[in-house]
Image (cartoon, rainbow, N blue to C red):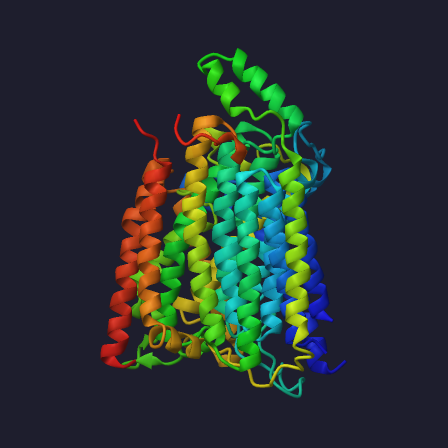
Amino acid sequence: MTPLLVAQIGLTLFVFVMLLNSAAVMVYVERKVAAFLQQRLGPYRVGWQGVLQPLADIVKLMFKEELRPKAADAFLFALAPIIAATCAFAAFAVVPFGAETTFGGWLPEGLRLQVADVNVAILVVFAVASMSVYGIVLAGWSSNSKYSLLGGLRSSAQMISYELSYGLALAGVLIIGNSLSLTDIVNRQAGTWLGFIPKWFVFLQPIGFLIYMTAGIAETNRAPFDFPEAEQELVAGYHTEYSSMSFAMFFLAEYVNMVTVSAVATDLFLGGWHGPFLPESLGWIWFLVKVGAILFFYVWMRWTLPRYRYDQLMRFGWKVLLPVAVINLLVTAAGVLYFEL
Amino acid sequence: MVSLNHYLVLSAILFAIGTAGVFVRRNLITILLSIEIMLNAVNLTFVAFGRALGAADGQIIVFFVMTVAAAEAAVGLAIVIALFRHRESLNPDSWTALKW
Amino acid sequence: MAFYVFAVIAVVASVLVIAQRNPIYSVLLLIASFGALSGLYVLLEAPFVAVIQIIVYAGAIMVLFLFVVMLLNAPHEETDYDERIHAYEAERGAGVPAERVRGAGAPGVNKVPMRFGGFLAAALAVELVWVLTKGGESGAFPSGAISSVKTIGQLLFTDYAFAFEVTSVLILVAMVGAVVLARRES
């Protein structure tokens, strides 16, 4: 057991616990921001300003009865939430969130602040994201309920449609960053242009960033693209029949997915842990700030925009987002060739 | 030590399983899945040979096979949907007539 | 060691794919099999192919299969019994002309060609294994594999540029074909 190995294991556990916590924090933030946007108070009874509300929610969920419809496919019904949660956590494994550090000389060599260093990290994120659709689709099918099935069908169609734009938006960054490793891409965004504009790829890929964010919202099934669960039409969509902890798993998966999409966006477009005023070793503070900003944006969108109609969603995905993404990729490639970036 | 032969034998077994699926099953979707198994067995052979010869060509051919598999799945499933609309069945024996 | 784990998963999952009566389980088991194959690609030092295998096969093609299985909602393969019941109900049901159903309903599943097919597949397996192992021990893989994405990309757009372009036409044709076939005639 070298110190480095111990540190790596500790880091992995730390990331896991922090992701769990982030879901709890996001539940609170979501409710508070929603209340703020709707000019009401939101939770304020449990603890100071309601900060213990997530704990109360967890306790409530744990003490609910675990129900399974009689006609449901028992095995798949149990498997679906596990797949959803596993995929959500797995994607974060390759996301770096800070510069190499020795913890003030405690370690003999630098430790990269990420769970696993993979040289095709972006593709891994993409692959895991494409697997997460199974949790939702299987939940929808195995419940043997019409609302669930409709939710699952919508989800599979939506995910396939928006994954293309998502992938093409990533490809634009790959071309500029000239690497498939997230660490390399972040390190290429260090420094500034003209002394004050940070070298973030969002300035080179503004359209790519917008496409990524839009497709990211669709991938995480958040409003205004929350068709798989559309309350007004489908009761609760794919998780209509779920209760107690298996429902909590879907809930957890949704928030962890949001955090992952935001973290990847930060690494790809917003310069990761690079920022002014702070030394490199405290870069993770910048990372947290940026991820927090994107998460706030997500919540803001949810409580501002109404849901699309389903045909509008499909038309937008295939006839607007995809062509724009393709053109963006072509222009990016031409630009990289022309300016020899 | 795992050698090239191990991979070749494995892909032969997988290919045979796929063939058996096409022969034995009477469900159009399972037959399409069996074809996917066969394509994947061949992919494994390509990558293993590419590794043994130290060339990247094996991996490139895998991409082409995947493209063909995607096209095949899209058209095949479209045909399955069209057939299902006619007979409410996925049994290939339901379509013994050329025209109806 | 890892090879044997992945190989066993791949083979067992594939066998179960064709042994399942429920297409949903078949699709899921096939995904498991693809996952194992992806692991084998990693062992063969082709990480790019491994990830693409997951993205394209497990993430796109299999979702399409699952989508169709759910859309048709016809989970179980028709056995002898099902077919009789099915034909009977359909005959009684409105809208379907009786003679059409009788023409379609095969007189029970004929097991002989199936058994013969299974035998052929087993023979193929034996033959393939025999041929492949005849060449003697092939020895270990050389060190220094070519796995960089850059090499693959360069080859793809130089030596294989024509095939690449033709592939794009193939995909276009498949897309048009799928739309035309699956469209409901109004």
Q: Measuring 62% from the left and 84% from the top, which residue is drawn there? A: A104
Q: In the visual, does A285 lie left or right of A167?
A: right
Q: In the visual, does B84 lie left or right of A309?
A: right
Q: Measuring 71% from the left and 35% from the top, which residue is drawn there? A: A66
- Point out residue B5 in the picture as x, y percentages from the top left corner: 66, 73
- Point out residue A330 in the picture as x, y percentages from the top left corner: 27, 66
**Residue furthest left in the image:** A338
Relative to C149, say whether A139 is above or below: above
* Foreground pick, C149 / B57: B57
Residue A237 visible in the displayed image: no
Relative to B8, say whether C67 is above or below: above
* Foreground pick, A323 / A277: A323
- Point out residue A115 in the picture as x, y percentages from the top left corner: 61, 70
* Foreground pick, A28 / A102: A102
Quadrant, the N terminus of chain B: bottom right
Q: Measuring 53% from the left and 74% from the top, which residue is drawn there? A: A98
* Foreground pick, A333 / A182: A333
**Residue A310 lies in quadrant:** top left
Quadrant, the C terminus of chain B: top left
- Point out residue C174 in the picture as x, y percentages from the top left corner: 35, 50
Residue C111 visible in the displayed image: yes
**Residue A40 lies in quadrant:** top left
**Residue A180 lies in quadrant:** bottom left
Number of numbered discs: 0
